[in-house]
Amino acid sequence: MNESTTGAKKWVCKDLSKLVRSAGVFYGDNPFDFSTPILYAQLSISALLTALLQLILNPLGQSAFISQMLVGIILSPSIIGDTTFAKTVFPETSFYISGTFAFFGCMLFMFLVGVKMDLGSVFTSGRKAVAIGLCCFIFPFLMNTSVAVILKQMVKMDVALDNSLFSIACFQSMSSFYVTACLLTDLKLLNSELGYLAVSSSMISGTLSWLVILMAFTVRQSSFGSTHPLPLLAVSLCVMVVIILGILRPIMRSMVKNTNRGRAVPEHYITSVFLMVLCCAFLGEFVGQHFMLGPMILGLVVPDGPPLGSALVDKLESYVSSILLPSYFIYSGASIDLCSVDMKTFGIVWVLVFSSFFAKLVAAMVPSLLCKMPLVDSLALGLVLSTQGITDILIWQHGMMLRLVDQKSYTCMILSTIFITGTITPLIKLLYNPSKRYASTKLRTIEHASENDSELRLLACIHRQDNTPSIIHLLQLSNPTIKKPICFYVVHLIRLVGRSSALLITHRPGKRKSSHSIQSSRIINAFQHFEEENHGKLTITAVTAMAPSASMHNDVCTLALEKRVAMVIIPFHKLWTRHGSDETLMNNPLRTVNLNILRNAPCSVGILVDRGSLSGIMNPPVSSTKTTHSIGMVFLEGPDDREALAYATRMAEHPSVGVTVVRLRDLNKAATGVDAEDVRNIELDSKMLEKFMAVAKGAGVVGKKRHHFRDKGVKNSVEMINVVRSMEKLYELILVGRRHSSESPLFAGLTEWSEYPELGFIGDVLASSSNNCGVSLLVVQQSDEGKTSKAKCPGVVVTTNNNNNNNNIAGSVRVDIPR
């Protein structure tokens, strides 16, 4: 290979006989003399280093973008230089092919960016989001251009920087929706209150930024031709948009229409869309635009979400983001030259960087504070909207190609992006914790709601359509009446796929249904039909929440807080069929969602374990009380048991329900005496039991006794389990409390053998895989405060309650499973 330098260009000559493939080391070839093995090595090294660095930096609160950029800089010529490794794995002759692959991956990435974007949210954003979005676009632009004018007049600089200064000021003031969405996803804040506002605001400012940049690039592109073909470029761009909107979009809509509901999108549809992406990229290059513009516009018109949008994301995202995209950052790193940057250029560019940063921060905070948003939340919002990412780098690279930005300034901007984003991300994580707002000073429980004799407010989560019958059956057992109505909220939780912005849709009767509510239509219809059958006794509000699994609990907890709900009912992650449990659900993220709700809910929580008796899969046991429905309740002591008993007491008022309460007394306490701290809990337990006895006595009819109370003394865990197991065949639903004292002899040894700690000791005994009983289970946790964590054993976190709140049992424990 020979090299020669002519002017500013460097010519590299390479033997074409060693261009593509190697015969192998056993035939005397060095694989690194050929382009294909070098390409594979570069893709592998960039992907592995990015994954490794992300694994290290994630616990520090850093986003994936920082890991990708750091790998690009580490493997850049400015760092590895002319070492043997650089000449072998990253020779200059390889960048022609690796750059092609990098931009191919980036093209697919930008197409997926378009697929995930929802332009409809631009027109449905609230006034606060519109005000913040406009301020974040206008104020930084005016501020930065003003600073650029002052710098040009007061500071002497080299010609290249002087010509680039206004472009740098404009680029730094721009914002991107996708950067904001990616950051919020990494921080698990996408569907928090801050996340919804940040996404809506960035859609406004990002759309305006892209329109300005597109016009600027088109004008700049036309200035290079001798004939000034600006009109032709504008017409060609319009023609490309018309082709995408008028031809390709209807084709994709017909694909969605012809895809059977619940079925996978046919492979030839995916192939057709992929060919559209390639054609749009070629068309963009053909008319003189950036080749990524066509695929991104095409992505914007793809119907987002299922079935087509989510199928495209499932097929492409992992490969593009994990394999192809890291190579783009290697290519970007090769474009920077750290040695060429002088302190004067560095200082001038960073003045514009910090000017735009503070302008965006102020532009986001001022409208937020005027809208009565807390100061810390306003600061966190400003930081989120001030970050930069991959879309900014793409714009800067194209600007450098159009000679709007010089290489020194480009290098300084890359370094500033890493510094600003790398500093901001941990700060946001430190400042904003959505779970803090769920802490309620007022106890929201069924026990306290029953004392006030007011309307009962419940919220139920639906993970899948199979949960609907059991939730409706439980709602029927909850005894909605005209005097004691139930306000019921049902939330269908859907994992966010194929779009970047989370959705929270409230379905109101008589209004046109959203295109995103198709997956929830059968669930909504079932609950609306049940509401019509019980007119005047209950009101049902259906909600669809689309969010990432890791932050899905935010929507549930926010709704529970805003609607003043007394209990959130969540289906157990394990589903039972006629042939046993459905093991395909064992490793899905639903268990994590349930655990997050248990930890953060501002009210009581009930975990519904349906073994078939509620959904109708199994025949319910024959009731010994000659009533339609037989309910059992195991009562020991403590707030969770009182909450379960309060719910059972309300069920006991139903004329077709028979409730049997089995109280298990710890005979060891009778021998050793009762601590002074337990006196208050004993009084509250007795009061709740007396209330049930009063309801049971009032429900009695001559010749019939619907409700029963049984008192049994037990000394150890074996006797307790025998009593609990004896109830399995007698009832269609058993209510139990979740948390009990682990120091009691009744639970000795149960902690070590617990299969589902989130169900508590008794719930785990009834729901364990070794138990083939057909009784359904409702495990209740009452809302409380003042918890401190203390690790007891690997994999389990035990929270001990040490305060003297009258509504809490001393020494109660909460067992949590970490993610």
Image (cartoon, rainbow, N blue to C red):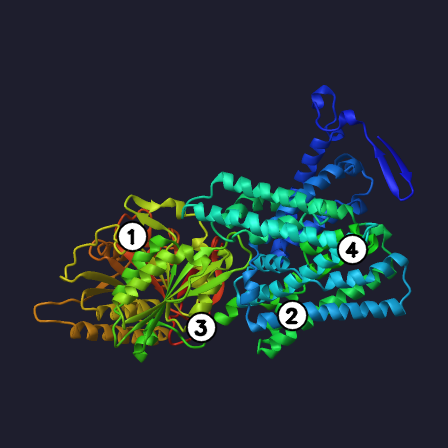
Q: Earlier in the sequence, mark 2 or mark 3?
A: 2
Residue at (52% x, 42% y) in the render: 270
Q: Earlier in the sequence, mark 4 or mark 3?
A: 4
Image quadrant of residue 508? Answer: bottom left
Kind of residue sitting beneath label 4 = Arg
Q: Position of residue 744 (x, y in %)?
A: 34, 62
Residue 58 disc label: none
Label 2 or label 4, whichever lies nearer to me, is: 4
Q: Nearer the viewer, mark 1 or mark 2?
A: 2
Q: Between disc 2 and disc 4, whose residue precedes?
A: 2
Distance of label 2 from label 4 (alpha carbons) = 25 Å
Q: Which of the two marks, 2 or 3, is nearer to us in this view?
A: 2
| Residue 341 percent across, percent down from the top left | 85, 55
Q: Nearer the viewer, residue 11 or 251?
A: 251
Measured as percent of width and height from the top left, residue 469 is found at 30, 57
Tally of marks: 4
Per the model, the C-alpha gap separating discs 1 and 2 is 53 Å
Please tell me how crowded label 3 is: few (under 14), some (14-19), or many (20+) other residues with Cα within 10 Å.
few
On residue 220, the disc is: 4
Crowding around mark 1 (Cα neighbors within 10 Å: few <14, some 14 to 19, many 20+) is: many
Q: Earlier in the sequence, mark 4 or mark 1?
A: 4
Give the image quarter of residue 765.
Answer: bottom left
